[in-house]
Image (cartoon, helix red, strand yellow):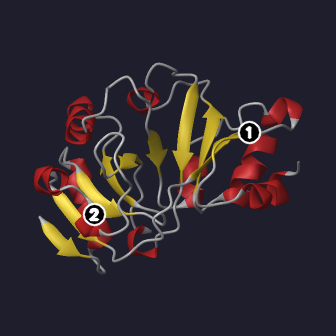
Amino acid sequence: MTGPGGADAAVRLTRTLAAGGVAVFPADTVYGLACDPGSADAVARLYALKGRRPDKPAAVMFFDRDAALAALPELPPRTRAAAERLLPGGVTLLLGNPRGRWPLACGPDPATLGLRVPDVPLLRGVSVPVLQSSANRSGGADARRLADVPAGIRDGADLVLDGGELPGTPSTVIDLRAYEAEGTWTLPRTGAVDARSVATVLGS
């Protein structure tokens, strides 16, 4: 099922995920692939479409910051406050995962959770979490436009949402696992949000 973005995009994405499907969708950075993070079959399909090894971690994405934070009541106060300041936006947060949530997204390190909350008005009505990865072949270029998503991925997905042309730079990855105890953070990957902007929020 392919269609442009619209008022019902959130409904269509939610239904696709609930049925165990895989969707191509526009984030606030690049096009992504999404599925139910609790469905082993859906996760396997998503990884197969990308040609990605199943032992590589993905991120869990929410389209609403409050829903994301409500789903993680164990987040300690300093880290929670940092997440409130950073989200939504073009960042992926690496967080401690003491309760082992969404193990299918965590790969070989269940103690670490990647959390993403993009700023996508089109999909704010999606209240469920998704496992997400970029809509490209593993190691390939990120997709700025829907036409940049490989045809095999578009044809293999159950839903394809067109969000027009996107910025094209993937999210900045911020490691907050030591932030609570030490007030320190690192950037394993710099992308859509530069280091200076992160430092302004978190301190250096």
The residue under the point 77% across, 31% down is: 178
Taking 168 as reference, is 10 left or right?
left
Q: Residue at x 33, y 35 (%)?
A: 38
The residue at the far bottom in this view is 7
In this picture, is 53 found above or below 153? above
Q: Is residue 203 above or below residue 53?
A: below
Q: Is residue 180 above or below residue 66?
A: above
| Label annotation for residue 156 | none
Quadrant where the N terminus is found in the figure: bottom left
Instruction: Give the secondary structure at mark 1.
Output: strand
Disc 2 target residue: 148
Q: Which one is in front, 72 or 171?
A: 171
Left or right: where 168 falls relative to 48: right
Circle 1 residues within 10 Å: few <14, some 14–19, many ≥20: some
Q: Work out whether mark 2 precedes mark 1 in sequence or the reverse, and give the earlier one.
A: 2
- Which amino acid type is shown beneath numbered disc 1? Thr
**Quarter location, residue 87:** bottom right
How far across and how far down the image is residue 37, in percent? Answer: 35, 38
- At 42% from the left edge and 58% from the top edge, which residue is drawn? 127
Task: Measuring from the top left, give residue 121's x and y in whole percent.
Answer: 46, 75
From mark 2 to mark 1, how far is it between C-alphas?
31 Å
Q: Say which element carries label 2.
A: helix
**How many numbered markers are drawn?**
2
The residue at which mark 1 appears reads as: 186
Residue at x-position 88% and y-position 51%: 203
Residue type at mark 2?
Answer: Asp
In the image, residue 63 lies at what x, y percent? 47, 60
Tell me whether circle 2 and circle 1 mark residues in contact (CB < 8 Å): no
- Characterize the local packing of mark 2: few (<14), some (14-19) or many (20 or more) Cα atoms within 10 angstroms: some
Taking the image as shown, residue 82 lies to the left or right of residue 39, namely right
Q: Give residue 194's position: percent from left, percent from top.
A: 70, 59
- Judged by depth in the image, the label closer to the viewer, 2 or 1, is 2
